[in-house]
Every structure is written in structure tokens, then in C-alpha cells.
Amino acid sequence: MNRSLTERKLIKTVARRNKIKQADAVIAILDMFVLIKETLAHGEPVEIDKFGSFFVFNGEERIGIKFKPERAFKDAVNGIKISSENDDDKAE
């Protein structure tokens, strides 16, 4: 079973979770990716809270992009339960 997050699944999920049309989700998601690419193309880092940072590096033989995940992101990927503001709301 393929459980990867495809662009189609991403769009549908964002639309459903935010109660917006899929067309609006497409616009927002694609614009976000364009903005990230434009920022990196200018050599500037992209820092996303609770996710991580993307930055351009100049290696000896090539220019590349690196991703440095934040601790909360690493813990989530490694299966460690992390609390969030949403968890607090559910407890009440």
C-alpha cells in the first residue's frame, strides 16, 4: 500500500481541514512552494516554525539546498508524541 503524501492528497487534506475549496488550496499550496523557491533562489534561508529551515550552500563542486529540521519535527518523524496547542484544546 502506497502511503506517500502526493500533491493530490495534500490538496484534498488541506482543503478538508480548512473547510475551503480544493481550488483555493491549490492556489495557496503552489504559491507557498513558489515563494520558497524564489527565496532560496535569492540565497536567503526559509525558516518555518515547528518544521525546519531550508538554506542554500555553496559546495566545492556545486550549489545545493539543505534542510535542517526543528526538534519538534524530528521527534514527530521518529514517533515521539509531542504536545501542541491543539492537544490542550481537546483535553478541555
Image: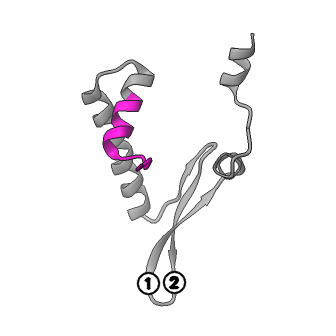
Q: Do the CB atoms of the residues marked 2 and 1 lie less than 8 Å apart?
A: yes
- The percent position of residue 22, horizontal first and vertical second, equals 28, 28
Name the residue located 70 percent from the left edge and 30 percent from the top edge: 84
Residue sitting at the far left: 23
Kindly identify which residue carries mark 2: 59
Q: Which residues are magenta?
A: 1-14
Relative to 54, 91 lies left or right:
right
Q: Residue drawn 45% across and 24% down?
A: 17
Within 10 Å of disc 1 (Cα), the crowding (few <14, some 14-19, many 20+) is: few
**In magenta segment, residue 4:** yes
Give the Cα distance between marks 2 and 1. Answer: 5 Å
Picture coordinates of residue 70 (x, y %)? 67, 52
Q: Is residue 3 visible?
A: yes
Q: Alpha-carbon neighbours of circle 2 within 10 Å: few (<14), some, or many (≥20)?
A: few
Q: Which mark is residue 13?
A: none
> Label 2 is placed on what type of residue?
Gly
Q: Where 18 sits versus 65, above or below?
A: above
Query: What residue lies at 46% left-to-right and 74% top-to-bottom?
Result: 64
Q: Which residue is mark 1?
A: 62
The kind of residue on which mark 1 rests is Arg
